[in-house]
Image (cartoon, grey):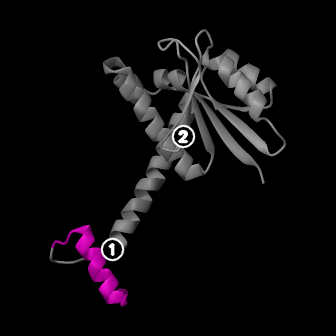
Amino acid sequence: MKTDVLLVDGYNVIGAWQELRQLKAKRLADARDRLIERMAEYKAHTGWRVIIVFDAHLVPGVEKKKRHHDVELVFTRENETADERIEKLVSELSGRRVQIHVATSDLTEQWVIFAQGALRKSSRELEIEMDEIDKIISGKVKKFQEQRPFSKIPLTDEVAEIFEKWRRGIK
């Protein structure tokens, strides 16, 4: 069974997605946080491992790795670009049972990672895919809400859960 990994060029995607560009114009951290949230939704839907790589040009020092919303974040070390780090990750993670996908609109980067065996996904393609995932998730949520029993008396979720347990004979 193959494992899929999505490497995301963070600032490249932020610059390509309209929603994220607008957030970046006001505050870069908000755009970063929103991208992380969206990629957490992507991971939850696809089951893929997701790693977002950010240039640390504004944060000098050593490379930093974090997890946020079950998405891995890599802030490159000083004088290392996201492209260079992504190329290293493609090399490190490559294997017979691993399929790596790289989301970036940097054409040169696409050719380099393609030569290493990774598949490319433009920032725009990722945005379109996320829009489709949003529709699927919204549909599932709507279907779930429609299946909930209707009560004429407004109940909190906690009280409704207690009543449901009583109905089922669960203590």
- How far is mark 1 from mark 2, CA to CA? 31 Å
Is residue 156 depicted above or below 76 in this figure? below
Residue 138: horizontal and vertical position, in percent? 40, 55
Which label belongs to residue 45?
none
Q: Is residue 161 magenta?
A: yes
Image-based side of 28 in relation to 114, left or right: left
Quarter of the image with the C terminus in it: bottom left
Residue 145 image position (x, y, % from top left): 34, 67
At horizontal 51% and vertical 21% (from top left) the residue drawn is 11
The residue at 71%/28% (across/down) is: 89
What mark, if any, has residue 148 been given in the picture? 1
Left or right: residue 134 versus residue 90 is left
Relative to 129, is 1 above or below? below
Mark 1 or mark 2, whichever is nearer to me: 2
Query: Which is nearer the eye, 63 or 29?
Result: 63
Tell me the number on the disc at residue 71. Answer: 2
Q: Note whether 143 is above or below 138 in the view shown.
A: below
Query: Of residues 71 and 7, which is closer to you in this image?
Result: 71
Residue 64 at x, y = what percent?
Answer: 56, 25
Density class for disc 2 (Cα within 10 Å; few <14, some 14-19, many ≥20) is many
Chief SS of the magenta region: helix
- Disc 2 residue type (three-letter): Val
Q: Residue at x 49, y 23 (%)?
A: 16
Q: Which residues are magenta?
A: 154-171
Q: Residue furthest left?
A: 153
Rendering quarter of residue 33 = top left
Residue 136, relative to residue 8: is it above or below?
below
N-terminal of the pair, mark 1 or mark 2, is 2
